[in-house]
Amino acid sequence: MKLQQPIWPRFLPTRTVLTLATLGPIGRKLPAPGTFGSVAGVLYFAVVFLDRLGLVGGLVVSAIGAYLAVAICGEAEFRLARKDPGEVILDEFVAIPLCFLGWPALVAAGLLPAWAILLVGFALFRLFDIFKPFGISRLQELPSGWGVVVDDLAAALAACGVMHGAAWVAHCAAR
């Protein structure tokens, strides 16, 4: 199965595509745009997901966000004529809520206060997004918007796995 870039963003004005892909001025005017896009993603998680959607709802909203990000980021890549441009940060924004899948279990583990879990998830996501371990770097080779977004989704899921693994180890050690 060959991954196809969605075609519907081709009909959007360039200004709209680039504004969405860069989260407006966040990606274009701030230093370290990926970090600021991730901060915006944590805020997105706190406002939209946190104790509101549950696991299934969070996965559905994340899947919709990922599809939209693939379409918009791929089109932005095309219009900017650059592979995975640094100012395109919609991928970080939509991926970071996946760091916190199973949020209630992380909080219930009592390892860290809720604010610290957000901070650790953010830090792990940035670490995995920047260094791309566990084969995450190969995901960037996917075509167009898929390569822009899927590596960030994998980094977020790796961060989630590490946090749940740490919570499990702490739980077992406490027994």
Image (tube, rainbow, N blue to C red):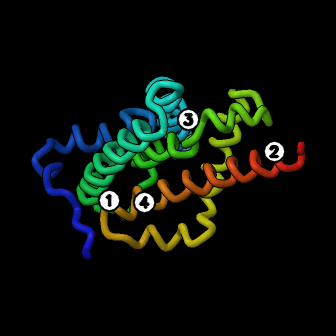
Q: CA distance from mark 3 to mark 4?
A: 19 Å
At x 60% / y 57%, what residue is drawn?
158
Dot 2 lies on which element? helix
Q: Are the residues flagged by discs 3 and 4 in contact, CB closer than 8 Å?
A: no
Mark whose residue sits in front, 3 or 4: 4
Residue 44 in picture, x, y percent from top left: 47, 30
At x 27% / y 69%, what residue is drawn?
3
User: In the rendered image, which quarter is residue 115 located in?
Assistant: top right
Residue 98 in picture, x, y percent from top left: 51, 45
At x 69% / y 47%, what residue is drawn?
163
Residue 175 in picture, x, y percent from top left: 89, 45
At x 50% / y 40%, what residue is drawn?
97
Could you say which disc has been placed on residue 87 in the image? none
User: In the rendered image, which quarter is residue 81 located in?
Assistant: bottom left
Name the residue tied to disc 1: 145
Name the residue tied to disc 3: 39
Q: Is residue 127 left or right of residue 74?
A: right
Name the residue tied to disc 4: 150
Name the residue tied to disc 2: 171
Q: Is residue 160 visible?
A: yes
Residue 46 in picture, x, y percent from top left: 53, 26
Dot 3 lies on which element? helix
Task: Name which of mark 4 and mark 2 comes first in the sequence.
Answer: 4
Mark whose residue sits in front, 1 or 4: 4
